[in-house]
């Protein structure tokens, strides 16, 4: 009797495995998995891009806040916008009446 049960068990297990394989093929489970994996990778890339853009936006906001309070930065921005400064040129301000070292 135990031999019949063992045979029935393996036969049932094989039938279950075959049924699962047919189901997976007909519903294209592997194709759906590949689509999911590709969309997850795309989502990760978009999240990285969003983080980069957020960092740039924060840096620009800090720069704008600096424009409101720093007169030298205001002057440099005006010169850049009106094309009064060349690329790579740095604007320096010399205070009158200050002696050197």
Image (spheres, rainbow, N blue to C red):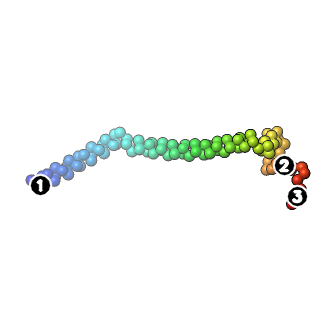
Q: Which residue is mark 1?
A: 2
Residue at x-position 37% and y-position 41%? 28
Q: CA distance from mark 2 to mark 3?
A: 14 Å
- What crowding class fits label 1: few (fewer than 14 Cα within 10 Å), some (14-19), or many (20 or more)? few
Q: Which mark is residue 100?
A: 3
Per the image, label 3 sits on a secondary structure element best described as loop
| Sequence order check, earlier mark of 2 and 3 | 2
Which label lies toward us, 2 or 1?
A: 2
Q: Quadrant of residue 57?
A: top right
Q: Earlier in the sequence, mark 1 or mark 3?
A: 1
Residue 49 can be seen in this image: no
Q: Which residue is mark 2?
A: 93
As helix, strand or loop, the secondary structure at mark 2 comes to loop
The one nearer the camera, 85 or 95, is: 95
Please name the residue shown 83% across and 45% down the image. 85
- Number of marks present in the image shown: 3
Residue 71 at what x, y percent from top left? 79, 43
Nearest the camera: 21 or 63?
63
Mark 2: few/some/many CA within 10 Å (<14, 14-19, 20+): few
- Residue in the image at 84% along x and 49% along y: 93
| Identity of the residue drawn at 31% across and 41% down | 23
Query: CA–CA distance between discs 1 and 3?
Result: 104 Å
Q: Decide if residue 63 is in sight here.
A: yes
> Looking at this rendering, what residue extends furthest in the left direction?
1
Would you identify the image quadrant in which residue 101 lies? bottom right
Judged from the image, the secondary structure of the residue bearing numbered disc 1 is: helix
């Amino acid at each position: 009797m135990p031999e019949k049960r063992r045979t029935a068990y393996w036969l049932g297990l094989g039938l279950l495995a075959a049924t699962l394989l047919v189901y997976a093929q007909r519903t294209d489970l592997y194709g759906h998995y590949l689509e999911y994996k590709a969309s997850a990778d795309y989502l990760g890339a978009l999240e990285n891009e969003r983080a980069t853009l957020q960092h740039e936006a924060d840096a620009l906001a800090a720069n704008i806040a600096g424009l409101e309070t720093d007169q030298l930065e205001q002057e440099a921005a005006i010169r850049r916008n009106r094309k009064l400064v060349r690329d790579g040129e740095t604007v320096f301000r010399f205070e009158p009446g200050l002696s050197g070292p």
